Amino acid sequence: MPAADASLPREPIPAVTDADRAAAFPSLRHGHAHDAGRNGLLRIDRLEAWDASGGSGQAWEAQAWIGGDVQRLWLRSEGERERSRTRAAELELLYGRGIAPWWDLLAGVRRDFAPGDGRTWAALGVQGLVPYKIEVAATAYLASGGHTALRAELGYELPLSRYLVLQPRLEAELRGRDDPLRGIGSGLSSAEAGLRLRWNLTPRLAPYLGLVHERAFGDTGRYQRAEHGGARDTRWVAGVRAWF
């Protein structure tokens, strides 16, 4: 018989018990909380510009949050300028609560600064991930005078290499009633589809190039044709995505 190896344990390894499993894999509070601490993030999803036949313009979309895994305070903002004129600008302040892994329920207020006079909306929505890591956000809005709106967004990130990421994105907005003063009609008012290719220059900074198609429908399209001469626009954009 070969001599016993002195480095091997002389006693047999005990069987794993339920107490051992509980110590190694504790139950998560609220089903998906990992950290009780407070964290924060500022992410600029779009900061872009273009120079097309219809004129030059700029657009932005950003969000920030502070809180934990279950409860967070959100700030969201987006807007657009064209021909040195602000076509749209808004800011949202929302309370978010995790209702399932990868899903948040949001409630708060939205303030429109353009077009037209300012308007304040009550907001209620959800955001999260569906299978295949598709980002989904849907928010319903209610303002005085019986004005209602629904905005839905879909986004996906397809890594092409270590540094290149292709991001298709789709956004649509519906309105409950006409708003002639702001040039918006009821029903499906507008939709935007974009395809952006970004280069992750650093983990926190990524310039990109993209192609965006925007179209207005129904009475919204009629208002835009009267003001701008057309209800659809396709343009190349260049911008940067960053987070802090």
Image: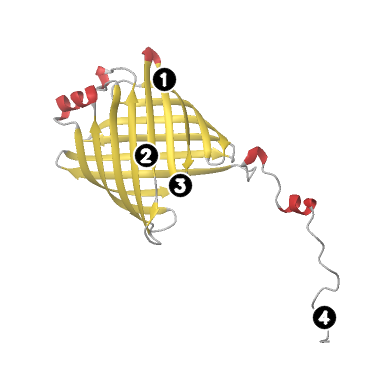
Label 4 crowd bin: few (<14), some (14–19), many (20+), radius 10 Å: few
Q: Position of residue 192 (x, y in %)?
A: 29, 37
Asked if residue 21 is positioned above or below residue 217 in the image, the reply reads below
The amino acid type found where label 3 is placed reads: Lys
Between 20 and 76, the one nearer to me in the picture: 20
Occupied quadrant, residue 136 = top left
Q: Estimate the spatial distance between the alpha carbons at disc 2 and disc 3, rounded to whole Å.
A: 20 Å
Between 198 and 171, the one nearer to me in the picture: 171
User: What's the residue at 34%, 43% (across, down)?
Assistant: 169
Residue furthest to the front in view is 1
Q: Estimate the spatial distance between the alpha carbons at disc 4 and disc 3, rounded to whole Å.
A: 51 Å
Q: Estimate the spatial distance between the alpha carbons at disc 4 and disc 1, rounded to whole Å.
A: 75 Å
List the residue tagged with mark 2: 61
The amino acid type found where label 1 is placed reads: Leu
Asked if residue 155 is positioned above or below residue 86 in the image, the reply reads below
List the residue tagged with mark 4: 6
Q: Estimate the spatial distance between the alpha carbons at disc 2 and disc 4, rounded to whole Å.
A: 65 Å
N-terminal label among 4 and 3: 4
User: What's the residue at 27%, 31% (across, down)?
Assistant: 86
The amino acid type found where label 4 is placed reads: Ala
N-terminal label among 1 and 2: 2
Q: Does the residue at mark 4 contact the one at mark 1 (Cβ under 8 Å)?
A: no
Label 4: which secondary element: loop
List the residue tagged with mark 3: 133
Q: How is the image coloured?
A: secondary structure
